[in-house]
Amino acid sequence: MAGKRSPIEAGVDCAPLYRSRVPETFQGSELGSRNRTRAAWWISFCRGGVVKLLDRGRVPEHVKVAVAGAGPAGLGVARALRVLAIPDVWLLERGPIEQSFLRWPSGTRLLTPSFPGNVFGLTDLNAISYDSSPGWSLKREHPDGGYYARYLEQAALAFGLNVEGGIEVLGLEPEGETFRLHTDQGEIGANFVIWACGQFGTPTDAGIIGAEHARHYAGVTRWQDVPGDETFVIGGNESGIDATLGLACAGKRVTVLARAAASWLDGDKDPSRVLSLFTRQRLDVAMKGGAIMLVDGADTAVLETYRANNMYLDDLACCDADKCLC
């Protein structure tokens, strides 16, 4: 703690977030020593939009724990290690910690509702730690990408996590009982490495031939900017249906092509295989407008462009569309 100043001590304008119980053994907080043990304490998040992390200098040449990726998974595990009093944990991120969420299409929101039940022992489902709540901090039940990005950056600041942005991990190899990380800023040694890179920045085309002729969900900023009046969406799970709802709201006719186990059917009780209740409610309302057609049992195999955008399904049927998303 010597030589370090908390956000509050540094003069940052902060507001109380919520109160929660902290274990007696907790020694990781940098928000002052007065309330670290046997007490309800305050985590304070900063007003005025997305805050910037404190300048912590250059990453050491060797660290105890290197976390590749500073998204929810990386920040969450770093917070857990802080609670366990494990020192010298560094998060390495090639962009800002909120990068993926700032790239979400406008209107896309978290599926699970944020409910600040921390005061009676129920963790917010969208939180990165048991003692934070984006619901309370953002005053949003289903935050969009921009709001959730704000929560992540505020949490990193409030918890005093060592986040180094602008450094990309290019490779990893064992070195005796430790590891060597190759980055675009040089090499870093680490006793332990935690890989916490997300999937949004590396989308897959599912092996569809000609997928380059379509636009991936991750490449859309605003649904109203997608050209044409009719659009085909390949894939009927959460991303596909969210795209469908955004396109329909933008005044387009949308056909969804999904494989046999369509997520909107009620044949599976596994919540990872069917639409969330939040998405299902939105879909039920949108279907009344008549602009959406859901097609199950359609396994898309090939995309070609010799006649607008043509999609060949596994039964060799051909469909035309102004634009295709997958």
Image (cartoon, helix red, strand yellow):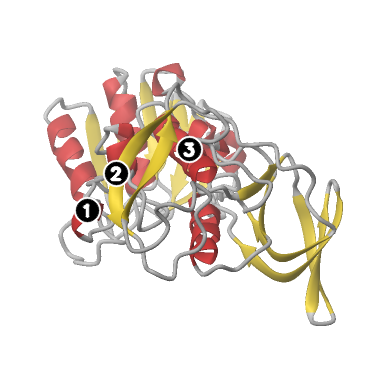
Determine which residue is flagged by label 3.
Answer: 154
Which comes before the other along the chain, label 2 or label 1?
A: 2
Q: Viewed as shown, does residue 147 lie left or right of 180?
A: left
Determine which residue is flagged by label 2.
Answer: 18
Q: Residue at x 53, y 44 (%)?
A: 156
Report the amino acid beneath label 1. Answer: Val
The percent coordinates of residue 203 (x first, y second) are 56, 47
Secondary structure beneath disc 3? helix
Secondary structure beneath disc 1? helix
Count of numbered circles on the image: 3
Q: 72 or 261, which is in the foreground?
A: 72
The percent coordinates of residue 314 (x first, y second) are 43, 55
Q: Is residue 235 above or below residue 136?
A: below
Q: Is residue 189 above or below residue 295?
A: below
What is the CA distance from the residue labelled 2 to the residue labelled 1? 8 Å
- Residue 172, by quadrant, is bottom right
The percent coordinates of residue 107 (x first, y second) are 35, 28
Determine which residue is flagged by label 1.
Answer: 119
The percent coordinates of residue 15 (x first, y second) are 37, 31
Report the amino acid beneath label 3. Answer: Gln
